[in-house]
Amino acid sequence: MSQVADTSLMAYQKIQPQLANRRAEVYLVLHEASARGFDMTNMEIARLMKWTINRVTPRVYELRGLGMVVLSCRRRCGVTGEWAKAWKVNKE
């Protein structure tokens, strides 16, 4: 059985508030877009927020896990031009 090192737990506890704040920032961007009838891909969120994709993708994943964000459709991304999943706020 593996144990999580104490130092890992301490590091996680230190950054946990930042994760929650970043998650909230991504949610607000998606909420505003959804309120206007739009969905957004991860790259579109990243560009709007001036974040790297590696900061956005995990936050969207967390929001999906919480049921706060759902798949809207697959469409061409406005940033990359490639097919991508677009997200919207779950209104249920």
Image (cartoon, rainbow, N blue to C red):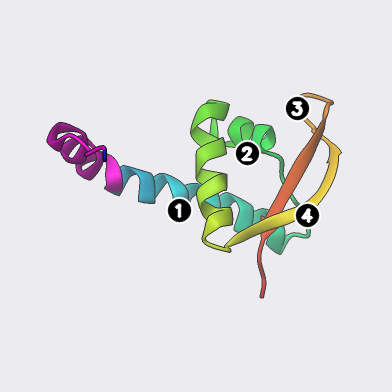
* Residues under numbered marks 4 and 2 in contact, where contact means CB atoms less than 8 Å apart: no
Q: Where residue 75 appears, x then y in whole percent?
A: 86, 40
**Amino acid type assigned to the residue bearing label 4 in the image:** Ser
Mark 1 crowdedness (10 Å alpha carbons): few <14, some 14-19, many ≥20: some
Mark 3 crowdedness (10 Å alpha carbons): few <14, some 14-19, many ≥20: few
Locate the C terminus and report the quarter of the image it occupies. Answer: bottom right
Say which residue label 1 marks.
24
Say which residue label 3 marks.
79
Q: Who's the residue at 37% across and 51% down the image?
A: 20
**Which residue range is magenta in the image?**
2-16
User: What label sits on residue 45 in the rendered view?
Assistant: 2
**Amino acid type assigned to the residue bearing label 3 in the image:** Val
- Cα separation, mark 3 vs mark 1, equals 23 Å
Instruction: State whether residue 86 appears in this view.
Output: yes
Q: Where residue 64 appears, x then y in whole percent?
A: 59, 55
Q: Earlier in the sequence, mark 3 or mark 1?
A: 1
- Cα separation, mark 1 vs mark 2, equals 13 Å
Q: Where residue 86 appears, x then y in whole percent?
A: 75, 45
**Amino acid type assigned to the residue bearing label 2 in the image:** Ile
Q: Who's the residue at 22% across and 38% down the image?
A: 4
* Residues under numbered marks 3 and 1 in contact, where contact means CB atoms less than 8 Å apart: no
- Cα separation, mark 4 vs mark 2, equals 14 Å
User: What label sits on residue 72 in the rendered view?
Assistant: 4
- Cα separation, mark 4 vs mark 3, equals 17 Å
